[in-house]
Amino acid sequence: MRILRIVDLSVTVGPGTVVYPGDPEPRLTTHSTIERDGFNLLSVSMGSQTGTHVDAPFHFDAATPRIDALPLERFFGPAVVVDATAAGERGRITWDDHLAPVASRLGPGVIVLLRTDWSTRYGTPSYFANPFLDAGACRRILDTGVRTICIDAINLDETPDDDHPGEGFPVHHLIAEAGGVIGENFTNVAAIDWPDPVVSCFPIALEAADGAPVRAVALQLEPLAGN
């Protein structure tokens, strides 16, 4: 099967990378140079939830698998893009309003990719006022057998601030209890303009970690002959 197109769904990691409030900020410093050492080498410091990343269940449940113990099938497969662009600032992504139209396409092995277009606000204060997945909708997604849910925003749950305390992290807990995976800070989802994309979001195999950065991409594959 031939790859017709690859769309990058990842933000660049560097000093300007947006992080969740309180998380470590990435630092990339020169360790070696060609002029001095004969080769270039960076020293990299960052949190496990930096940039476009995935959360292991262990992120919110110490009794569940860590990132290097999860089956790789969690990070690659057919994707269903859910149009949640109308949810708006701190809006709920609900089953009836956003997921019902694609419900028949959900099932085991499917990656759900919530498109809010909030990535267009990346680097601005309003990026933290993201739309978020409703807990009831999350339960229904998990009931279909889906175990990987990703979003083009900082948080799959509501991000709290001084004016909006939020509800905690109900969706994170639900997905962790199901042994599922969360992907956050995806970008460029609007560029997936073909049906039936395949998404790859394999994490760095950080030992015993709660999550890890990924280089997420969407693939357009040439259909098999006769399909």
Image (cartoon, grey):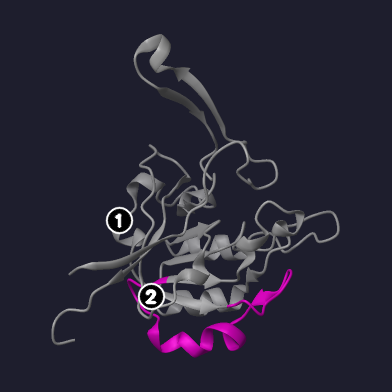
Specify whether residue 91 is painted magenta.
yes
User: What is the distance, in whole Å, between disc 1 and disc 2 at their CAs?
Assistant: 15 Å
Picture residue at 55% right of the left edge, 56% below the top: 185
Is 147 left or right of 109, judged from the image as shown?
Answer: right
According to the picture, the residue beneath numbered tag 1 turns out to be: 71
Residue 138: horizontal and vertical position, in percent? 54, 74
Rendered position, 15 above or below 159: above
Return the residue nearer the eye: 37 or 108: 37
Residue stretch in magenta: 84-111
Picture residue at 54% right of the left edge, 35% below the top: 46
Residue 189: horizontal and vertical position, in percent? 50, 67
Q: Residues within 10 Å of mark 2 (few under 14, many from 20)?
A: some
Q: As drawn, which residue projects farthest toward the left?
A: 225
Q: As drawn, which residue projects farthest toward the right?
A: 163
Is 176 left or right of 68, judged from the image as shown?
Answer: right
Return the residue nearer the eye: 215 or 97: 215
Rendered position, 96 above or below 120: below
According to the picture, the residue beneath numbered tag 2 turns out to be: 145
Give residue 33's quadrant in the image: top left
Q: Which quarter shows the N terminus?
A: bottom left
Give residue 5's quadrant in the image: bottom left
Residue 71: horizontal and vertical position, in percent? 30, 56
Rendered position, 124 above or below 41: below
Is 63 left or right of 227, judged from the image as shown?
Answer: right
Residue 134: horizontal and vertical position, in percent? 63, 74
Return the residue nearer the eye: 65 or 118: 118
Amino acid type of the residue tagged 2 in the rendering: Gly
